[in-house]
């Protein structure tokens, strides 16, 4: 299986930060929030917030667990464990950057949008992903992808991040 | 009348091998090594010594035990939702299946033995429908309501020797005291379970670890013990014969032992087989099969009851057979009725759980399940004007029996042995 | 957690089940902070509340929990007359089966009824209290409340005070707390506290013994005289002998102990007025956590109805 290394991921995150700085240069700090989808997306979101802050563009950090909004809950025998969502700010009139590690069918992103709308009425929401492995089942497209694997992956993309898995790479 | 010969049977009391000639003799033979009368037997010799005519009908009983059939002093036969005749038929069939030739039938719904007409129609139905002898226990009070005494003289004239309100202790001791004084003159025996109703009201099992974790209120042992003590003192004062039903506690055994050793006459007692075999822990997670009255107690109680059987304090082991519809037993524990069925499996269960592990000998079982109960009831054939004696049965201890709903002929399946294998099969009657 | 259909007792749960339900409770509680206090997890599922004993609190707590998970809630009104008439549980079960419910929340005065219903229904059955047997959702909310207050449950000492004999709360809450590593003791009037040899739980009969035992949490049970036909003890003694009086409250305050109660509270019997406003009285937390705990329970059970949909 081909692998993307820790260094390449680090580089990609820098590029990602640069993209965010350019695209949202006009947003006056306080209106930008990076919201990661639990688990992995929240880790990426936290790193992006730190990088933005270092570059002089403060952004809010949030995390959401979409488990209770999944459309396949009742098709499963057991229920997945729940994690807490964490959005300690009003989302009204904010620009929210939704961050996930792997984009595929689009069902997770759909559920995430449903979660966000129950917290308030954001001005704008973008979808940013570390990888895209293709296989979309919903009319959902990312605004930013760090690694587009949709043409090369054979259906499986595994992301490891240091904070959760104790190592860092992407295999596909 | 031709004879049937039984060869190579093992006489359960002594273990010797014998041959028998079964036919109609003028006098019933008494076994030469015990004084048990053997009706239908007109010859008996050690195995191999009997002259068997060529072509005679022979039953080879090699590997089978020969013993008098059992008499059960405590059976309730009413099958809810069935006719009385069906209830009688089923109980008789189940009795023979379990080695029981006769039983004392407790009054119950449908069988309220408090008047001549009910007793007459019961006797008719039994003679037409039952495989087993059934002796009705007359009611102590009219309709078993605990208020007005039943007409004992009328009942006695129809062969009633035992009075019982289905085990229920009357609320009024004054009524019972007077009833005992009146009935004492007719040589009737009162069969009652020791209880203090206000102490056992709204209780469902033995108080202990299981009752705590299931949140069921416990029946204090002292309710039974105070009841036993009360009954003994009343009967002693009234001069009445008393049979204590289904003793379940160690202390209860002690009270009876003390009374007997003080020379009290006319006092007998019974234990239900399930109180020797099971404890309150068998209730497990609300298993209603193990809901009994009195409740299943501790292991020490089982042991004390067994010791009581061995030393003669407890005279009889009974089935306390109680059919319950599976619908009723499927209810929650509080709502489900009390009782187990035991007639179908009586002798195999006794053999498997008491004789085989060496807890009781054949001699002790025959005393507690054959001779003692017969002596208490004195079953009498009023048409023939003779006492009725126990027939013989053959028991094959090496044959296994799977207890399934199909093998239970009593009509319901509330048996703790359902789904288990017991040791031994019964041939009764032998023919 | 492995798929589990019913919640009848705490004993039936594995350690993993208990931890999973407890952990998800705090995620459920976060939902209350959103502007939309609702998640679609049980959308289209039907929940029936079947209460043979009146209880506005537990019933509404379950109903709110079900609503917040987007389930449809039906209230099955059991008229006292049909209970008196002796309609058997089986008849009721047949009725329930035809209603094709996914979750049935049942309370009954007889111990063991929810177990019977659970055996015969495809729906998930949640025991909301049966006789003196079990009240598992109360156990979860109590455990969660202690966890929330102290960070962990292991090593904490909880004394449960009152009519233990008739209390399903005492049984379920002591079971879950001990499974999670807490120590539990019982205290109350002599006839109402079962023997330690039956329960495995230390048995006290006065406050001095309790203070010596050094508990962290004082858990008061409601005195339920209406359930008892023959009195067990003189009720007029209760407050002075077993209640939290103002004097005892001062000692509780000095020792920084918490007070819990499953509600509703009899002021002046179990507890004096002042104790209701005491800084470590967790009774209101228990009510709020009750909804979250019940959401977590509903979420983690798997009805057998869904596989056939």
Image (tube, helix red, strand yellow):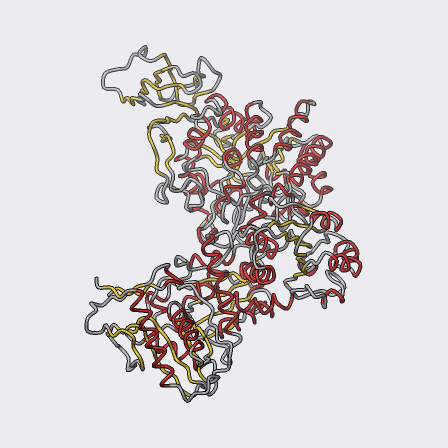
Q: Residue at x 34, y 75 (%)?
A: A14
Q: Residue A30: where, in percent of width, then height?
A: 48, 84
Q: Residue C148: where, in percent of width, then height?
A: 57, 63
Q: Is residue B421 left or right of residue B177?
A: left
In the rendered image, the vertical position of residue C227 relative to residue B316, given as above or below = below
Screen quadrant of the C terminus of chain C:
bottom left
Q: Nearer the viewer, residue B322 or A5?
A: A5
Residue A147 appears in view: yes
**Location of residue A132 (image quadrant):** bottom left
Q: Nearer the viewer, residue A115 or A141?
A: A141
Q: Is residue B4 left or right of residue C32?
A: left
Screen quadrant of the N terminus of chain C:
bottom left
Q: Residue B200: where, in percent of width, then height?
A: 64, 46
Q: Residue B201: where, in percent of width, then height?
A: 64, 49
The residue furthest top is B49
| Number of marks drawn | 0
Q: Residue at x 38, y 78 (%)?
A: A98
In the rendered image, the vertical position of residue B256 relative to residue B110, given as above or below = above
The residue furthest front is A55
Residue B4 appears in view: no
**Location of residue B46 (image quadrant):** top left
Q: Nearer the viewer, residue A89 or C36?
A: A89
């Amino acid at each position: 299986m081909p692998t993307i290394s820790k260094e390449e991921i680090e580089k990609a995150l820098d590029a990602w930060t640069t993209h965010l700085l350019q695209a949202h240069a006009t947003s006056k700090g306080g209106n930008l929030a990076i919201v990661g989808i639990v688990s992995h997306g929240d880790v990426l979101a936290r790193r992006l917030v730190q990088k933005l802050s270092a570059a002089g563009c403060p952004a809010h950090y949030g995390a959401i667990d979409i488990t209770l909004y999944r459309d396949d809950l009742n098709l499963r025998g057991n229920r997945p464990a729940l994690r807490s969502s964490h959005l300690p700010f009003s989302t009204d009139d904010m620009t929210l950057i939704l961050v996930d590690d792997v984009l595929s069918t689009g069902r997770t992103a759909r559920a995430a949008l449903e979660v966000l709308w129950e917290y308030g009425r954001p001005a704008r929401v973008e979808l940013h992903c570390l990888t895209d492995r293709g296989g979309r089942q919903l009319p959902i497209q990312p605004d930013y992808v760090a690694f587009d694997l949709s043409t090369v992956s054979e259906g499986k993309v595994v992301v490891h991040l240091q904070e959760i898995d104790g190592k860092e790479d992407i295999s596909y | 009348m031709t004879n049937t010969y039984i060869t190579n049977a093992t006489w359960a009391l002594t273990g010797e091998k014998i041959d028998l000639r079964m036919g109609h003799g003028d006098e019933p033979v008494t076994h030469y090594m015990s004084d048990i009368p053997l009706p239908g037997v007109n010859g008996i010799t050690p195995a191999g010594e009997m002259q068997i005519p060529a072509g005679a009908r022979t039953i080879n009983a090699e590997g089978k035990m020969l013993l008098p059939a059992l008499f059960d002093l405590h059976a309730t036969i009413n099958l809810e939702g069935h006719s009385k005749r069906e209830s009688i038929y089923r109980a008789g069939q189940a009795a023979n299946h379990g080695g029981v030739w006769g039983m004392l039938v407790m009054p119950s719904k449908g069988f309220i033995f408090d008047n001549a007409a009910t007793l007459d129609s019961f006797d008719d139905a039994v003679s037409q429908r039952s495989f087993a002898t059934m002796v009705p226990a007359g009611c102590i009070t009219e309709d078993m309501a605990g208020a007005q005494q039943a007409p004992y003289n009328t009942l006695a004239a129809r062969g009633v020797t035992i009075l019982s309100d289905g085990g229920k202790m009357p609320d009024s001791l004054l009524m019972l005291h007077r009833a005992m004084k009146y009935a004492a003159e007719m040589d009737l025996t009162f069969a009652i379970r020791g209880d203090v109703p206000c102490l056992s009201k709204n209780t469902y099992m033995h108080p202990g670890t299981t009752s705590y974790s299931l949140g069921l209120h416990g029946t204090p042992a002292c309710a039974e013990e105070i009841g036993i003590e009360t009954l003994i003192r009343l009967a002693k004062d009234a001069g009445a014969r008393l049979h204590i039903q289904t003793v379940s506690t160690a202390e209860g055994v002690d009270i009876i032992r003390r009374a007997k050793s003080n020379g009290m006459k006319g006092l007998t007692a019974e234990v239900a087989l399930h109180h020797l075999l099971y404890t309150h822990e068998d209730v497990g997670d609300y298993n209603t099969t193990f809901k009994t009255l009195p409740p299943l107690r501790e292991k020490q109680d089982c042991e004390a009851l067994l010791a009581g059987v061995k030393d003669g304090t407890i005279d009889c082991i009974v089935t306390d057979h109680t059919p319950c519809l599976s619908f009723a037993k499927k209810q929650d524990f509080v709502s489900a009725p009390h009782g187990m069925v035991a007639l179908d499996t009586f002798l195999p269960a006794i053999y498997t759980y008491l004789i085989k592990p060496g807890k009781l000998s054949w001699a002790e079982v025959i005393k507690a399940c054959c001779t003692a109960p017969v002596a208490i009831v004195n079953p009498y054939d009023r048409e023939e004007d003779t006492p009725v004696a126990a027939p013989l049965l053959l028991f094959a201890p090496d044959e296994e029996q799977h207890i399934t709903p199909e093998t239970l002929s009593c009509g319901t399946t509330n048996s703790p042995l359902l789904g288990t294998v017991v040791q031994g099969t019964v041939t009764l009657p032998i023919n | 957690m492995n798929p589990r259909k019913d919640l009848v007792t705490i004993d039936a749960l594995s350690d993993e089940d208990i931890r999973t339900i407890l952990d998800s409770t705090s995620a459920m509680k976060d939902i209350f902070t959103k502007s939309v206090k609702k998640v679609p997890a049980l959308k289209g599922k039907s929940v029936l509340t079947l209460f043979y004993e009146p209880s506005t609190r537990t019933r509404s707590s379950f109903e709110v929990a079900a609503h917040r998970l987007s389930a449809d809630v039906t209230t099955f009104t059991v008229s006292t007359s049909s209970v008196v008439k002796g309609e058997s549980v089986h008849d009721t079960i047949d009725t329930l089966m035809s209603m094709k419910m996914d979750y049935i929340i049942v309370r009954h005065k007889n111990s063991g009824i929810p177990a019977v219903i659970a055996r015969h229904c495809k729906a998930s059955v949640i025991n909301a209290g049966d006789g003196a047997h079990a009240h598992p959702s109360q156990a979860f909310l109590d455990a969660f409340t202690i966890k929330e207050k102290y960070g962990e449950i292991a090593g904490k000492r909880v004394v449960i005070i009152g009519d233990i004999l008739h209390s399903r709360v005492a049984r379920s809450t002591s079971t879950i707390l001990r499974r999670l590593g807490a120590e539990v003791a019982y205290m109350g009037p002599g006839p109402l506290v079962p023997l330690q040899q039956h329960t495995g739980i230390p048995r006290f009969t006065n406050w001095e013994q309790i203070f010596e035992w050094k508990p962290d949490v004082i858990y008061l049970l409601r005195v339920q005289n209406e359930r008892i036909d023959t009195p067990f003890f003189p009720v007029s003694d209760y407050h002075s002998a077993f209640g939290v009086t103002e004097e005892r409250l001062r000692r509780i305050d000095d020792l920084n102990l918490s007070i819990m109660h499953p509600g509703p509270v009899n002021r002046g019997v179990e507890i004096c007025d002042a104790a209701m406003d005491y800084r470590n009285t967790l009774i209101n937390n228990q009510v709020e956590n009750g909804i979250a705990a019940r959401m977590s329970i509903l979420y983690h059970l798997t009805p057998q109805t869904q596989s056939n949909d």
